[in-house]
Image (spheres, helix red, strand yellow):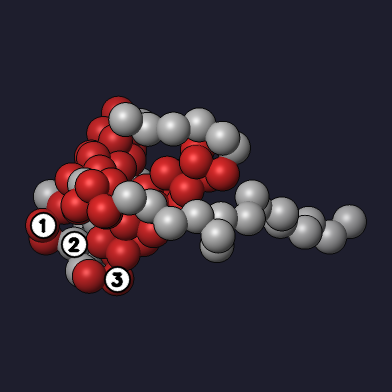
Amino acid sequence: MTYNPKPIETSHIQLPKEMEELREKLAENIHEVWASQRIQEGWTYGEYRDDQKKTHPNLVPYENLSEEDKDYDRNTMMETLKVIMSLGYTIK
């Protein structure tokens, strides 16, 4: 069986300027939540990801992440907000 992802279509959603201004703070929080969960599971910082040793190079403060890793968190946050709006909810 082949998995065929079907995310909710959000390309038509335009976020209000105010939400875009929150982008960095919300992306930072996404990283903080992820890092907290990893640490609770026994993961620590390591130069390379090693699932056996539970080490990960992104277990650092948000400001120390590469722009590529920050973009992952930014995109996750932006898509989440767009899905909320596409489902008919409003954020005030």
Dot 2 amino acid type: Leu
Q: Residues within 10 Å of mark 1 (few under 14, many from 20)?
A: few
Return the x and y of residue 20 as percentages of the image width and height: 27, 54
Q: Is residue 64 above or below residue 21?
A: below
Q: Amino acid at mark 3?
A: Glu
Q: Residues within 10 Å of mark 2 (few under 14, many from 20)?
A: some
Q: At x 11% / y 60%, what residue is drawn? A: 64
The residue shown at (10%, 57%) is 63
Q: Which residue is mark 1?
A: 63
- Circle 3 is placed at which residue position? 68
Q: CA distance from mark 1 to mark 2?
A: 6 Å
Quadrant of the rendering where the N terminus is positioned = bottom right
Q: Please tell me whether residue 9 is drawn above or below residue 33 in the rendered image.
A: below
Q: Residue at x 50, y 38 (%)?
A: 84
Residue 39 shows in this picture? no
User: Residue 65 — which label?
Assistant: 2
Q: Hey, what amino acid is under mark 1?
A: Glu
